[in-house]
Amino acid sequence: MNPTLQTIAIIFLLIGVASALVIAIDLFAGHPQQMWIMNLVWPINALYAGPLALWSYFTVGRLSTRRAVQEAKARGEDPPGKKKAFWQMVALGTSHCGAGCSLADLVAEWTLFFFPLILFGMKIFGAWTIDYFVALAFGIIFQFFTIAPMRGLSLGEGLLAAAKADFLSLTAWQVGMYGWMAIATFLIFGHEIEKTNPVFWFMMQIAMLVGFLTSYPVNWWLLRSGIKEKM
């Protein structure tokens, strides 16, 4: 593997971790989100989006802090987060899906490192299969803690609504993510990249950004149709 590419990969991975730490510190040092699940969503997304996530958090995420919402209610006003442009709401809903995918990929990929699943003669196909179902599970959990409180749903109703909201969004995300990893694996490098190599995770960062792009229009439709909640 090219040493220069490995160095670039390490730099981008460190930027992602640093961005996540900055957001986490800001959240837990006095700016927690009104919706508690977003305290996880923001730093997790920063792991792959880096400075883009930082910019989004400080320009959009800070509008929905617990303090901002309470102060607006005390003045009899709508919370500032409700005044976001629709495209920002779509981006937020898409990143919500991205957090579930990111967390699932971290868990699944490292599990498969120790217990690999080989399909069609390659570990990558086994990984994609496991990643999808683990990501779907995490995505439904993340959506449940968004939709259920906002709609006042029971456990069963909330899980069903979360599954409806997350299935298409997550599937569209995974299509983009797997598409990029297929290009990287079979076209750019011509072989599978070991998970212990920082280049693998750098490629995953790019794959997540591509997944965001393929999932964004689906989230636009989900929010317009009322299947997903605006945040």
Image (cartoon, helix red, strand yellow):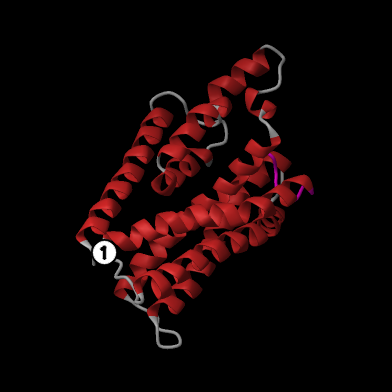
Quarter of the image with the N terminus is bottom left
Find the residue positioned furthest to the left: 3
Residue at x 36%, y 33% (from the top left corner): 22
Q: Is residue 226 left or right of residue 46?
A: right
Q: Amino acid at mark 1?
A: Asn
For disc 1, the marked residue is: 197
Query: Does residue 211 show up?
Result: yes
The image position of residue 46, as x and y in percent, is 42, 43
Stretch in magenta: 225-231
In which quarter of the view is residue 146 placed? top right
SS class of the residue under badge 1?
loop
Q: Is residue 161 left or right of residue 37?
A: right
The secondary structure that dominates the magenta segment is loop
Residue at x 30%, y 67% (from the top left corner): 195
Question: How many C-alpha atoms fall within 10 Å of the one at disc 1: few (<14), some, or many (≥20)?
Answer: few
Find the residue positioned furthest to the right: 225
Q: Is residue 2 left or right of residue 115?
A: left
